[in-house]
Amino acid sequence: MADKKTSGIPVVARLSVAPMIDWTDRHCRYFHRLIAPRALLHTEMISTGAIIHGDRQRFLGHDESEHPLALQIGGSDPRELAKAVRLARPFGYDAINLNVGCPSDRVQSGRFGACLMAEPTLVADLVAAMLDASEVPVTVKTRIAIDDGPVPAMLDELVDRSAERGVQTFYIHARAAWLKGLSPKENREIPPLRHDVVHALKQR
């Protein structure tokens, strides 16, 4: 049998519902489950600090009906991410997702989210630490680039380095993230969609 940590998401669904901070809480996920019985759901992004120092039942608790369910984490310290993953184990998530796609100022100030695309070696170290601590697959959510970064080279390097460390599933928002001058909402609308970039990556 393949290693559960590196064999991909252990669910039959190919459809997943994207997370959104302050929206995809357990009540929203219950609604999503009603209309999409087999989709993979994600929690809203939860920082390593919230998991390590906060009310874990509040941040990590969920209902059994929400499964299959992935926990999305934000962070940039390998040791803290590993600790957060270990603390999340008893809650029984089906996968752990690292956010490398959120462009908000608040997230950037914590040095996680989309700004990590500029540090693909660090991202590889992060996912390696998470995999070492996890009993379920670790996945990555990202963009195709940040700011004026080269497309598709920036995405390819991040994916290749993380894949070398054991990640097999990537969720790609097919837009660049502009880290200055746009709100998160504008970052979902203004940068042009580049489905061709994601398609080319899939064909490799």
Image (cartoon, rainbow, N blue to C red):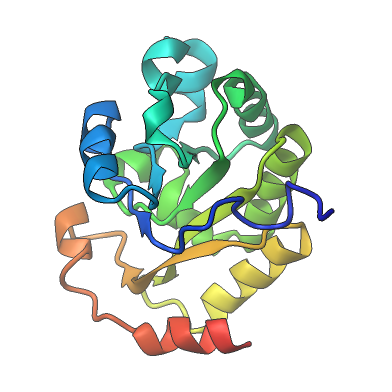
Q: Is residue 136 above or below residue 50?
A: below
Image location of residue 19, percent across then percent down: 32, 46
Image location of residue 142, percent across then percent down: 46, 61
Image location of residue 175, percent across then percent down: 32, 73
The structure residue drawn at horizontal position 65% and vertical position 47%, both measured from the top left corner, is: 137
The structure residue drawn at horizontal position 33% and vertical position 84%, both measured from the top left corner, is: 194
Total residue callouts:
0
Q: Is residue 76 above or below residue 103?
A: above
Q: Quadrant of residue 114?
A: bottom left
Image location of residue 102, percent across then percent down: 35, 52
The structure residue drawn at horizontal position 78% and vertical position 38%, both measured from the top left corner, is: 132
Q: Is residue 115 above or below residue 135?
A: below
- Say if residue 151 shows up in the picture: no
Image quadrant for the C terminus?
bottom right
- Say if residue 59 shows up in the picture: yes
User: In this orientation, which residue lies closer to the viewer: 137 or 118?
Assistant: 137
Q: Quadrant of residue 131?
A: top right
The structure residue drawn at horizontal position 23% and vertical position 75%, both measured from the top left corner, is: 191
* Horizontal arrangement in the rendering, residue 149 relative to residue 18 (left or right): right
